[in-house]
Image: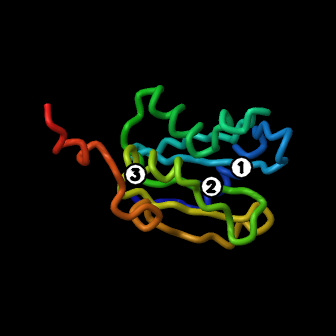
Amino acid sequence: MKIDYKKLVAAAAKAREGSVSPYSKFKVGAALLTKRGEIIGGANVESASYGLTCCAERIALFKALTDGKKHFIAVAVVARADDGPTPCGACRQLLAEYAPGAKVFIADSRHLKKIREFTVEALIPEAFTGSSLAAVDR
């Protein structure tokens, strides 16, 4: 399937409007593309207890997974950040587990036409995944 990355980035920018970020004011939107062409959006949600905050990428991924979607080919992330916001370590870990091989597109919300592209593997090489547990003594 050919990835319409401009449409995916636009969906992430739209999802960003749902950000609940009263503390940092750092609004992030993400859009996840399934193998069937469905787009699932998500936005970050903050808590005064910062450790409970959840990133846009994880919100989109959790929404998709709990709706029974399992095969992802791309994700876009948009925020007001020079060169675009790369996913945090927790988001990289979950993408490595649930969207291996996916393309990752990032853009600054002020410059949506300037899109950087990565792969999940480039963002988290040698990721710890379910196959890493195969050697566990049982």
User: How far across and down, in percent of the image, does residue 122 sit?
Assistant: 43, 68
Q: CA distance from mark 3 to mark 2?
A: 16 Å
- Residue positioned 68% across, 65% down in the render: 84
For the N terminus, give its image quadrant.
bottom left
For the C terminus, give its image quadrant.
top left
Q: Describe the element under mark 1 as helix, strand or loop.
A: strand
The amino acid on which the numbered mark 1 sits, given as a three-letter code, is Val
- Which comes sooner in the sequence, label 1 or label 3? 1
Label of residue 44 in the image: none
Q: Describe the element under mark 3 as helix, strand or loop.
A: helix
Q: Is residue 73 left or right of residue 78?
A: left
- Residue positioned 80% across, 65% down in the render: 110
The 10 Å Cα crowd at callout 3, few under 14, some 14 to 19, many 20 or more, is many
- Which comes sooner in the sequence, label 3 or label 2? 2
Q: CA distance from mark 1 to mark 3?
A: 20 Å
* Label 2 sits on residue: 77
User: How far across and down, in percent of the image, does residue 81 sit?
Assistant: 75, 64
- Which comes sooner in the sequence, label 2 or label 1? 1
* Label 3 sits on residue: 96
Does the image show residue 2?
no
* Label 1 sits on residue: 28
User: How far across and down, in percent of the image, does residue 79 sit?
Assistant: 73, 57
The amino acid on which the numbered mark 2 sits, given as a three-letter code, is Val
Q: Are marks 2 and 1 in contact (CB under 8 Å)?
A: yes
The amino acid on which the numbered mark 3 sits, given as a three-letter code, is Ala
